[in-house]
Amino acid sequence: MVRVMRSTVIDAPVSAVWDVLRDYNGHDRWHPAVSTSHVENDLYADQVGNVRNFLLTGGERVREQLLSFSDRDHSFRYRIVEADVPLENYIAEVSLRPVTDKNRTFWLWTSRFDTPPGLEQEMQQLVAEGVYEAGFEAIRSLVESPGDVSRADSTVAVSEGIESGSAMVFTRYGEPEVFQMRPISAPPPGAGQVRIRQRAIGINFIDIYCRTGYFRYVEPPGIVGLEAAGEVIDVGDRVTHLASGQRVAYACLPFGAYTSVRTMDAALVVPLPESIDFATAAGCLLKGITAQFLLHQVHPVRAGETILVYAPAGGVGNLLCQWARHLGATVIGATTSPEKIQTALDAGAHHVITPGQSSLADQVRDLTGGRGADVIYDAVGRDSFAQSVEALANCGHLVSYGQASGDIGNWDISSLASNSATVSRPNYAHYTDTQDKISSITSELFDAIQRGILKVKVQHQYRFEQVAQAHHALQNRQTTGSIVLMPE
């Protein structure tokens, strides 16, 4: 596979450059290699899925499909559907970022493709020079003022030297306002490492535990976060499963995901399918991995079983409901918020219970003919543990995988004898500590998303500087589904 990555700096604001590029069907008006162009089936130029059919000045016909488009991120991705030139499996992305110095625009254009044997170098040169660099110069002539002379050399690879960015650092243990944005740099990757330009970052309850000091995994001033998605800038020696320009995601230790650029060990970073966007990946990977090993490894759910899921409108709970229902289980959701009942039902819960005159255990037994739940997935902890044990069927399995309300404290194991209960306390790291384990889990997770078994809802996207607002919303139970940070 051939990969091309070119960048330049345009001496004009992002808005001016984007005004030209965002017209996906307008490249015949500025690119010297394009003669005529039209969008098929009368679709809008910025409508994802549209196909632009254009003629090159040499007479070759090319059809390209728009895969993603974002006015906010100033980026789009596309692929060649059909072409008279020998470019196969061609996928490319255009992205713009502001350069604060003199209000300029950083433009990155990347692609990967296959060619017939022997044509690799010729096609790489054609794309890099005849398409990308020619496009840079054409846009520059349109939007730059005549007197502008400062620019970056478009032939310089963006991966050389230090990559600069920004990070959200918590300066002390405390409330969300302890976060401060600070500049950060990512060095070139060493052996076994990868350097990533992060496009979306997942926010999870463990981030709150770290920020408040409940878990002392990260000492201030420090960077929290376990989950993000983005593009590979470059890789170090001995990294064979990733390559420059590749879309990737991760949900693993060490902490430090709240940053726009990062160099880290590559073993647990996984390739991201083209059909899954960055926000979806960052919003679901940690939660989806958790749902996979809870349902398929900790307690392999079988058709006909009844399961109880706490917080069914939340990130993990929502995925547990969807996946368990697909597996043939009867799903009961338990929420304290009447406003979230419909969200739980939409996620696949057959029944939803809320606090009322009857206890949780009584409500579960009413729904199961007095039997109780075969398995309970409890992420609440201290406030729910006793009622979870009581709500189990004989020989039922309580999977305590979180402690949103606090540690469960000390329990006499003999209390479990009343219904011969089994209790598990799985540790995420033990299921995801090798490349083989994470590859197997994410392969099954991505397949479930692509097949529509799991519908990931990223209900809340926050700008990087809104991290405090995002943390307040999560810890105050004001969110449903996943929430993500979007770095600039």
Image: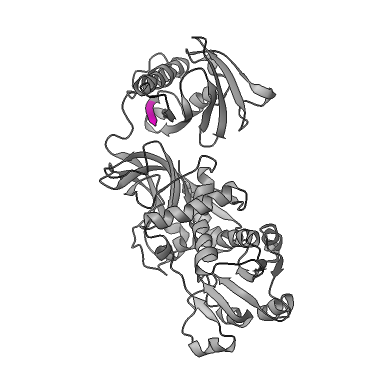
Q: Is residue 226 visible?
A: no
For the point 45% across and 31% down, the residue is: 96
Pick the front one: 252 or 447: 447
> Residue 132's x, y, as percent?
42, 21
Q: Position of residue 169 (x, y in %)?
A: 38, 54
Question: In the figure, 198 relative to 365: above or below?
Answer: above
Q: Residue 109 location, x and y as percent?
A: 43, 28
Magenta-highlighted residues: 1-8
How was the colour assigned to the protein in this rendering? one colour
Please provide percent x and percent y for residue 285.
49, 53
Which is more toward the observer, 337 or 447? 447
Residue at x 37% of width, y 62% of height: 172
Q: Relative to the observer, which residue lies in front, 317 or 298?
A: 298
Residue 455 vertical placement versus 382 (above, below):
above
Front-lying residue, 126 or 218: 126
Magenta stretch encompasses residue 229: no
Residue 105 lies, with reference to residue 212, above or below; the image says above
Q: Is residue 6 magenta?
A: yes
Q: Quadrant of residue 22?
A: top right
Q: Tell me if 134 is positioned left or right of 403 in this view.
A: left
Which quadrant, please, contains the N terminus? top left
Residue at the image position 47 percent from the left and 16 percent from the top: 142
> Which SS type dominates the magenta stretch?
strand
Above or below, 289 relative to 414: above
Q: Quadrant of the C terminus?
A: top left
Q: Is residue 42 visible in the rendered structure shown here?
A: yes
